[in-house]
Image: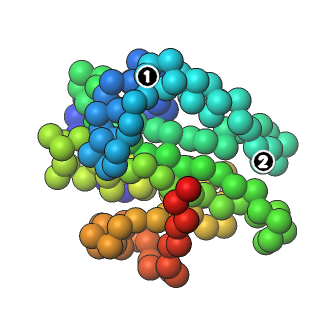
C-alpha cells in the first residue's frame, strides 16, 4: 500500500469540496453546469441511499477525495456497492470517476485512491470490484492489479 504525501488526507467528499471536485473531474470528462445546490443535492441523495450489509445500513454511493496540505480536493474516486441476485445475493463494487488534478499527477494519488476503494469494497464483503476505462488507461489499472475482463458496451441516450 502506498503512502500519501505529508499533509495529504483521504476522506469522504463533503459540500465544501465543490469547486475543487468539479475542477478535478474536468480532467476526466465533461462535467457540465453543476451548481453548488445540485452538488449538495447529489451528496444528500448518496447519503440517503443505503444498502444493508450484515444488518448494518451503509451508503451505496461512496465518493472519496484526497486533499492536499491546504485541504483542497486534488483526487477523486467513487465506489458504488451493488447487491446482486446472483452469487447468493453477493456484493459487487463499481469504481467510477477516478481523477487527479493536473498539478498533482505523478504522485501516485490515483493508485492510492484505487487501493483505498478496492480495500473499502473488500471490507464490505464484495466478491469483486469492476470498472470501465478508456484504452489509454488500461495500463494504469493493470498496474493497480486489475485485469481486462470483457468489453464495455454503451447506449447513449
Measuring 32% from the left and 49% from the top, which residue is drawn there?
A: 28
Dot 1 lies on which element?
Answer: loop
**Residue 130 can be seen in this image:** no
Q: Nearer the viewer, residue 27 or 5?
A: 27
For label 1, the crowd category at 10 Å Cα-Cα, with few meaning under 14, some 14 to 19 and many 20 or more, is few
Residue 112 lies, in percent from the top left, at 35, 51
Q: Quadrant of residue 76?
A: top left
Q: Total number of numbered labels?
A: 2
Q: Which one is closest to the eye, mark 1 or mark 2?
A: 1
Residue 77 lies, in percent from the top left, at 43, 46
Task: Using the image, tell me which numbered label, if any, was put on residue 53.
Answer: 2
Measuring 56% from the left and 56% from the top, which residue is drawn there?
A: 157
Task: Identify whether 12 is placed above or below 40.
Answer: below
Residue 122 lies, in percent from the top left, at 60, 58
Q: Quadrant of residue 134?
A: bottom left
Measuring 40% from the left and 65% from the top, which residue is drawn there?
A: 133
Task: Identify whether 110 is placed above or below 18.
Answer: below
Dot 2 lies on which element?
Answer: strand
- Residue assigned mark 1: 35
The reply to whether dot 1 and dot 2 touch (C-beta < 8 Å) is: no
Looking at the rendered image, the quarter that the N terminus falls into is: bottom left
Residue 42 lies, in percent from the top left, at 57, 30
Measuring 50% from the left and 79% from the top, which residue is drawn there?
A: 151
Task: Identify whether 47 is placed above or below 87.
Answer: above
- Lower sequence index among marks 1 and 2: 1
Amino acid at each position: 500500500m502506498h503512502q500519501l504525501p505529508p499533509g495529504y488526507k483521504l476522506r469522504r467528499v463533503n459540500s465544501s469540496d465543490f469547486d475543487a471536485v468539479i475542477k478535478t473531474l474536468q480532467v476526466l470528462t465533461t462535467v457540465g453546469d453543476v451548481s453548488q445546490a445540485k452538488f449538495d443535492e447529489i451528496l444528500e441523495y448518496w447519503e440517503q441511499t443505503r444498502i444493508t450489509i450484515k444488518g448494518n445500513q451503509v451508503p451505496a454511493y461512496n465518493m472519496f477525495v484526497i486533499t492536499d496540505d491546504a485541504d483542497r480536493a486534488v483526487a477523486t474516486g467513487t465506489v458504488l456497492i451493488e447487491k446482486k441476485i446472483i452469487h447468493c445475493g453477493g456484493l459487487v463494487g463499481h469504481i467510477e470517476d477516478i481523477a487527479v488534478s493536473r498539478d498533482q499527477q505523478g504522485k501516485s494519488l490515483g493508485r492510492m485512491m484505487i487501493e483505498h476503494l478496492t480495500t473499502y469494497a473488500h471490507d464490505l464483503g464484495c466478491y469483486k470490484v469492476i470498472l470501465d476505462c478508456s484504452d489509454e488507461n488500461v495500463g494504469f489499472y493493470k498496474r493497480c492489479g486489475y485485469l481486462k475482463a470483457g468489453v464495455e458496451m454503451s447506449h447513449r441516450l
